[in-house]
Image: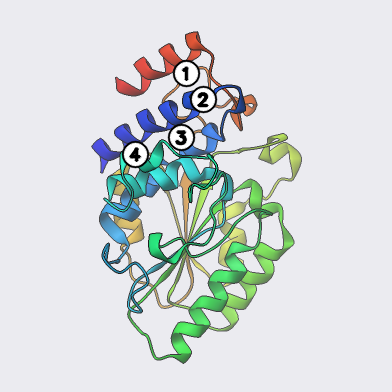
């Protein structure tokens, strides 16, 4: 999983550079490499030959602008090919800037406006329970900036009320959003305590430590469970780390050469 995360970062840099002046949401993608590697290579249950199988786990990618991490993880898992990655954000490609629902690829949710994915996850969990499916789990990826949305907390309250022990949320807490530092735009501190007050089981881990992520994400819970992954936006590329300007950006030749070297080290 560590090796896969390194490869994923290399692919993210290549995909961003390939888009020229259009650029991509690379900062948030780089912060999520280990999260997505652990999910696709160690935690999620799915069948590559039948991504719509009823007994699969569901992944709701609510943090829609992090698709560089999603698609490169899918490639590491053998769901996508390297050739598929080269079509990112091109006409007629299924790999759009934000994820578009695609059952054949196991993309469960179309994300554009943020803050909706957790509500979708709550609905899926309720549906699975009504069907008598006691084995499948629903994993929802959200950003910490996305948690400014009131819909997140309405969904959190609903999940606790209905006792959804089949729901796991992973928060990519990189402490940056489009407009800047999350604590300056809308402080949610103490963040973990807020989830606890809604009746959730919680864990806070280093989001770049695959062992810590795997341990947290394979914990059993008798109630909704949130894993807060503390990460660095732009992780692996020195001039992007902690820099809100790389929420979305394009790489010139000099930046590309430096980024390629740094993510390979």
Spatial CA span between label 4 and label 1: 28 Å
Spatial CA span between label 4 and label 2: 28 Å
Q: Mark 4 points at which residue?
A: 83
Q: Residue at coordinates 32% horizontally, 62% vertically from top-left?
A: 44
Is there CB contact under 8 Å for labels 4 and 3?
no
Residue 238 x %, y %: 47, 18
Give above or below for 33 relative to 126: above
Q: Residue at coordinates 68% horizontally, 36% vertically from top-left?
A: 178
- Is residue 237 in view? yes
- Give me the disc on residue 241: 2
Spatial CA span between label 3 and label 1: 12 Å
Residue 251 x %, y %: 53, 19
Is there CB contact under 8 Å for labels 2 and 1?
yes
Q: Kindly report which numbered mark, 2 or 3, lies closer to the viewer in this rendering.
A: 3
Q: Kindly report which numbered mark, 4 or 2, lies closer to the viewer in this rendering.
A: 4
- Is residue 231 in view? no
Nearest to N terminus: mark 4 or mark 2: 4
Q: Mark 3 points at which residue?
A: 30
């Amino acid at each position: 999983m560590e090796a896969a995360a390194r490869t994923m970062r290399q692919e993210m840099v290549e995909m961003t550079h390939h888009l020229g002046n259009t650029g991509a949401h690379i900062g948030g993608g780089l912060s999520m490499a280990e999260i997505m590697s652990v999910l696709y290579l160690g935690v999620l249950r799915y069948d590559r030959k039948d991504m719509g199988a009823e007994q699969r786990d569901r992944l709701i990618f609510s943090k829609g602008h992090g698709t560089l991490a999603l698609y490169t993880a899918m490639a590491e898992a053998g769901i996508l090919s390297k050739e598929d990655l080269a079509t990112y954000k091109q006409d007629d490609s299924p790999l759009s800037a934000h994820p578009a629902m695609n059952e054949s690829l196991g993309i469960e949710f179309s994300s554009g406006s943020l803050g909706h994915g957790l509500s979708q996850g709550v609905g899926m969990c309720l549906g699975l329970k009504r069907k008598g499916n006691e084995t499948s789990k629903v994993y929802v990826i959200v950003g910490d900036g996305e948690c400014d949305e009131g819909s997140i907390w309405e969904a959190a309250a609903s999940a606790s009320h209905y006792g959804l022990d089949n729901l796991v949320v992973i928060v990519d807490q990189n402490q940056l959003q489009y407009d800047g530092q999350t604590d300056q735009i809308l402080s949610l501190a103490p963040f973990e305590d807020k989830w606890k007050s809604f009746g959730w089981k919680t864990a806070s881990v280093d989001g770049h430590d695959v062992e810590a992520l795997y341990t947290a994400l394979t914990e059993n819970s008798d109630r909704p469970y949130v894993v807060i992954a503390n990460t660095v936006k732009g992780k692996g590329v020195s001039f992007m780390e902690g820099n809100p300007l790389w929420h979305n950006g394009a790489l010139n030749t000099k930046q590309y050469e430096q980024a390629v070297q740094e993510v390979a080290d």
